[in-house]
Image (cartoon, grey):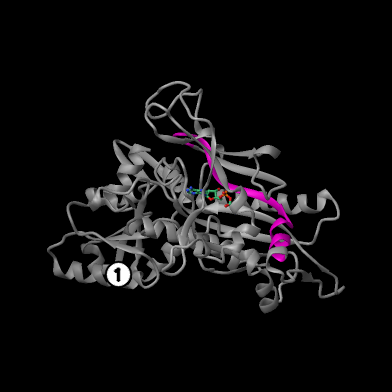
Amino acid sequence: MDKIVALCKRRGFIYPGSEIYGGLANSWDYGPLGVELKNNIKQAWWKRFVHLREDIVGIDAALIMNPKVWEASGHVANFQDPLVECKKCHERFRADHIKNGICPNCGTKDSFTSEQMFNLMFKTFIGPAEESSNIAYFRPETAQAMFVDFKSVCDTNRMRLPFGIAQIGKAFRNEITPGNFIFRTREFEQMEIEYFISPPKNNSDWQGFFELWRKEILNWIKDDLGVDMNKIHEHEIEAGERAHYSKRTIDFEYDFPFGCSELYGLAYRTDFDLKNHEKFSGQNLKYKDPETGEEFIPHVIEPTWGVDRSVLVALLDAYSEKEGRVVLKLQPKLAPYKAAIFPLLANKPELIKLAHKVYLDLKQNLTIAWDDRGNIGKRYASQDEIGTPFCITVDFQSLEDSTVTVRDRDTTEQDRVKIADLMKYLTERI
Ligand code: GAP
């Protein structure tokens, strides 16, 4: 983890938040390369689950919703963790994170206060008066907007069951023990789908959809995140451990350097949310079957992905060292830069001119880096460290025959490619 955190800071992936003021514990800012990696992950997800499918549409809802939403969803009553305080050092911890009764801060054994439940939602006030009637919450999950907007999406888009509503956005949780870099923070992003199905007549009805989504999550991890599947484990969550709304949950875990922990989740939320929103809002949230005219509340399968944990896993899994140098073997489509352009010598105007033209042409469609400093070996090393899959050198031969060398990050092999064919060459490989 230390190596990843240092690399992220050194190369502009992720910095400590508010650093010039001494930072703010567990807050992180994505820098120029980090935001590209994060956006590439979000775009790959949106393409796979919204654009390439006929049964899922997207929304982008407000972060602060009517506070009644969180009463209906059960978050006001149930979204809480057990909190204990060490009597010696007065640090506070999540009770279920304590191992063998030992304080993770000062090492004292069995000196904790009794457990108190602590609600994780971030409170704020709407308008100038800080009164209880003005209390609102920053959303602790993106999911509720898909339930609240369910009827509007049905009506405006003529969706037919089974169908899904997807959203990518920020969520906020006042975590008792954030930590492990961007693994657990108080402000993070989620990519979630609420997949609505007809009320199941028997268990196998919903289990079939649950199984489909289990495979979809695994396929995403393998194909889009490009992660070593040996490091992925499925953890069936027992009844007493599941969130208040779930009848079945699987956590998809990854072997992080700090232990095997949750990456994504899959839950069968039944009709819990829509039913409660119908009750609390007084609105009819039933789906009307266009063929039979029958009205009913659909049930929901919910696959959920953390964006920041995806970024962390992409970085951890891609990290490798070769002869003391870092090579970040990111999936090409996730890499911040798809290629880097190197004019062989920085003091030859005709080389610079041609290289710059290649750079600007490719930049129309791909993210491209420019580097004219130091020798070519150093430039390769610098790009390997940030995961750039291709390095393109414009040399003296380029001036004669309009070809360039393209060097592959992972094999380090070089091809001589016509400038006119470069875009095709790169896009085929990305
Ligand atoms: N709508 C269901 C839901 O929110 P969750 O398991 O609480 O379920 C979903 O959260 C995903 O969000 C997790 O699998 C994880 O990837 C991410 N996540 C949750 N809490 C997080 C935190 N404090 N920091 C970073 N990511 C978090």
> Where is mark 1, residue-wise?
358
Q: Does residue 259 show up magenta in the picture?
A: yes
Residue name at image x 61 percent, y 62 percent: 69
Quadrant, the N terminus: top left
> In the rendered image, which quarter is residue 257 located in?
top left
Badge 1: how crowded within 10 Å, few (<14), some, or many (20+)?
some
**Location of residue 176 in the rendering, given as x and y in whole percent from the top left corner:** 46, 42
Q: Residue furthest top?
A: 109
- The stretch in magenta equals 256-278
Q: Does residue 262 show up magenta in the picture?
A: yes
Residue nearest the observer in this picture, 319 or 77:
77
> In the rendered image, which quarter is residue 359 located in?
bottom left
**Ligand 1: does it lie within 8 Å of the C-beta at label 1?**
no
* Up/down of 208 relative to 1, above or below: below
Helix, strand or loop for disc 1? helix
* Up/down of 161 relative to 89, above or below: below
Residue name at image x 85 percent, y 51 percent: 202
Amino acid carrying label 1: it is Val
**Location of residue 264 in the rendering, given as x and y in whole percent from the top left corner:** 57, 47
Residue name at image x 39 percent, y 60 percent: 36
Instruction: Say left or right for 91 vs 225.
Output: left
Can residue 354 be seen here?
A: yes
**Location of residue 430 in the rendering, given as x and y in whole percent from the top left corner:** 46, 59
